[in-house]
Structure formats: C-alpha cells, structure tokens
Amino acid sequence: MVKKVKSAGNTSRAVWIGTLALGGGLVIASSAALASTAFQQGAQPQAAQSQAKGESQYPQLPEGPGKQTLVRVCSRCHSPTNVIANGQSRQGWEDTITKMVGLGATGSDEDYTEILDYLVKSFPQVTSKINMNKATAADIEKQLGFSAKQAEDIVAYRQKNGNFKSLEDLQKVPQMNVMEITARKNRMTFE
Ligand code: HEC
C-alpha cells in the first residue's frame, strides 16, 4: 500500500501502478452510481451519452482524448478546470500527477497516462502570473479556470473591500472553496 509519496520523478511509475490496485474498484463504483442517478432522473439518452463522454461538461477544457478521464479522476477535491491555471512542461505535469496521487487521487496507470498526454498537449508551460488586484472577471475566468460566478464574486469582493494582500484574503470571498484557491496559487500575485 502506498502511503507516502516522495516527489522524485522516477518513483512515479511505481506509485501509479500501486494506486491501480487501490483505486480501481472505487472509481468503477462511483461512475456506476452516477450513471444510475442520471437514469432515474429520466435524462435524455443523448444527454446522458454525451455527458458520459465528458463532452458537454466543462466547455472551458478543450475536447480531446483524456478530457473525460481528467474530469473523472481529477474533480474530487478541486474543479478540474484548475489545470487551465497551471500550464507546464511534461516533467512538471508528471510531477503534479505524482503529487496528486500522494494527496489521495485514485486512478489506474492508464488513466494517468491519458491525463498526462492531454495536459501536456492542452496546457503548455506558462510563466505569466495574474495580478488579482487588477484582473477583470473575464481574465480570472479564462486564465485561471475559475467559474464565471467565482470570478464575478472575486471582483465584487475586491470592489467592496479593497485590494487583496494574500491568498488568505482571497479565501474570505463568500462561498469560495479554499481548495479552489490553493489549486491555482502558483499563477496568482497580489500587487
Ligand atoms: C485527493 C484530492 C485531490 C485530487 C483527487 C486531485 N487533486 Fe490536485 N490538488 C489537491 C490539493 C490539496 C492541491 C493543493 C496542493 C498544495 O497547495 O500544495 C492540489 C493542487 C493541484 C494543482 C496545482 C499545482 C500544485 O502542485 O499544487 C494542480 C495543477 C492539480 N492539483 C491538478 C490535479 C490533477 C491533474 C488531478 C488528477 C490527476 C488532481 N489534481 C486530483 C488535491 C487533489
């Protein structure tokens, strides 16, 4: 059983394989539960089908192989759209996935390979940061992958209370989930 993960790149493969045994059953169980909920609610077969493919979900994320897997494996703790804020090199994405496994993400070795390829292709390295005291709601949504509502709430709070000084200030925005902020912290500045 994999308990602690060191972030050294060459341990990642062993960790991924270790997680396969731990996580596979849970993932299957939860997607079956989702599918049966949709059925009970009488969802249109077409809608259910495109949702199963991950197409209509999270339109901010580009379509492509691996998107559906990302949504399935990476939505539990923070929204999967946080990846928009974290574009990086292949090595960087590998390290991030290894880190997420260490934090408790559950998926198979194949899932992680698909997610890695999708992320490398869709979100290459970015180094620019977003100044949370100057950015418009549109910037916050597009560059950081916050929802439109979250972006508007951030700007409204800033207009009312003045500049943010730190991540902690951002956490005071009403209805803001702390995890959504920490999962984007590398791209934000408070100038
Ligand atoms: C078990 C909960 C959990 C799951 C599942 C999860 N994450 Fe995270 N993620 C976190 C936490 C906690 C942080 C904040 C870590 C920090 O502040 O150091 C985070 C932060 C991030 C970051 C910001 C960069 C960083 O290193 O902190 C990225 C990118 C990210 N996650 C991507 C993913 C991807 C891709 C997946 C799916 C493979 C995933 N996450 C699944 C908990 C999770």
Image (cartoon, rainbow, N blue to C red):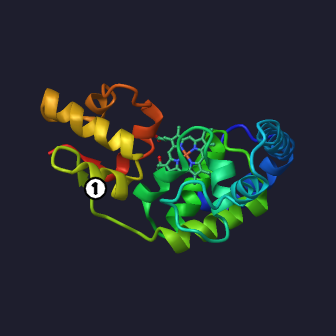
In the rendered structure, which amino acid carries the disc numbered 1?
Answer: Asp
What residue sits 77% from the left and 63% below the top? 110
What residue sits 72% from the left and 61% below the top? 53
Q: Which residue is mark 1?
A: 139
From the viewer's perspective, is residue 188 above or below residue 171? below
If the picture is divided into quarters, which one holds ligand 1?
A: top right
Say if residue 82 shows up in the picture.
yes
What residue sits 55% from the left and 50% below the top? 80
Name the element at disc 1.
Answer: helix
Answer with left or right where residue 120 lies relative to residue 126: right
* Image location of residue 1, percent across then percent down: 81, 39
Residue 4 vs residue 190, the one in the foreground: 190
Residue 136 vs residue 84, the one in the foreground: 136
What residue sits 60% from the left and 68% below the top? 118
Task: Locate residue 26: give its quadrant.
Answer: top right
Answer with left or right where residue 115 lies relative to residue 162: right
Task: Locate residue 54: give its quadrant.
Answer: bottom right
From the viewer's perspective, is residue 125 above or below residue 96? below
Q: Which of the image's four quarters has the C terminus?
A: top left
* Image location of residue 169, percent across then percent down: 26, 29
